[in-house]
Amino acid sequence: MTSADVSAGRRGRRAENRDRILLAARGLLVTNPAASMDDVAQAAGVVRRTVYGHFPNRDALLAGLADKAAADMLAALGRIDRARLDPAVALAEFTLTIWTAGDQYRLLMALAESEYGSAGLRDLLAPIRAQAMELLVRGRDEGRFATHLPLPVLSGAMQAITLSLLQAVNDGLWVGDGVRAARAILIAAGLPAAEADEAIATARAL
């Protein structure tokens, strides 16, 4: 085995450890935003020193975790080109994808309640909000969505609805799924219930 092979092996193990730590931290912080670095190490099955080798302090761990959650969500949203879809179908598919990535959203909510703060959450969600805004603008331009609210207000309201529904599921207050969430979002955008259901059915068949 060459020195290059040894180095590659070490890098691989380091990456595996980092992923294991982030996965463990995600599971803990969704339900307990105050989980300690020791808690994370125990959940990840590594020693405390290994956690600190990747993340020198709790702030670095939270930032790494939040960045990964946002990146995972953006990757999921990037798997389909919504520009070719009817705006209602595109918004339905967007919401269904967000709901599928609900673990990341719930994590971001948990981080917002921790020392990471709501400002960090706003920054992380900015690219996702931008995609949602594009869909709303196109839908309104094509006469598919209502004009009862200014677009920035409507976009913020939809994000709040999505976060609230995810939190309700997390708290055991609502037994919901992506279809019901998408229906709520489309109706909030101004679609009649029947049209919302049709758009969701089309989106699910993509």
Image (spheres, grey):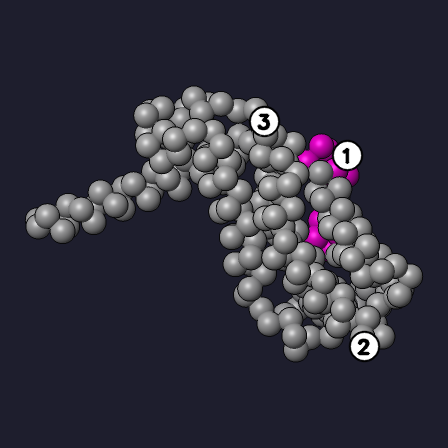
Does residue 108 appear to the left or right of 46 in the view shown?
A: right
Label 3 Cα crowd, 10 Å radius (few <14 / some 14-19 / many 20+):
some
Residue 142, label in figure:
2
Residue pictured at 45% horizontal, 38% vertical? 22
Q: For mark 1, what is the residue?
A: 173
Mark closer to the chain start, 3 or 2: 3
Compute the Cα span from label 2 to label 1. 36 Å
Residue farthest toward the right in the current orientation of the protein: 148
Q: Position of residue 33 (x, y in %)?
A: 58, 28
Instruction: Quote the CA–CA distance across marks 3 and 2.
Output: 44 Å
Q: Secondary structure at mark 1?
A: loop
Q: Amino acid at mark 3?
A: Asn
Instruction: Give coordinates of residue 140: x percent, y percent.
Output: 82, 71
Which range is magenta? 168-181
Q: Is residue 102 visible?
A: no
Q: Nearer the viewer, residue 45 or 105?
A: 105
The disc labelled 1 sits on which kind of residue?
Leu
- Where's residue 114, x and y in %? 61, 30
Tell me what residue is drawn at x 63 percent, y 53 percent.
126
Seen from the viewer's position, the closer of residues 64 and 96 is 64
Residue with the mark numbered 3:
32
Would residue 143 be found to the left or right of residue 25 on screen?
right
- Badge 2 or badge 1: first in the primary sequence: 2
Query: Is residue 16 visible in this depiction of the protein?
Result: yes
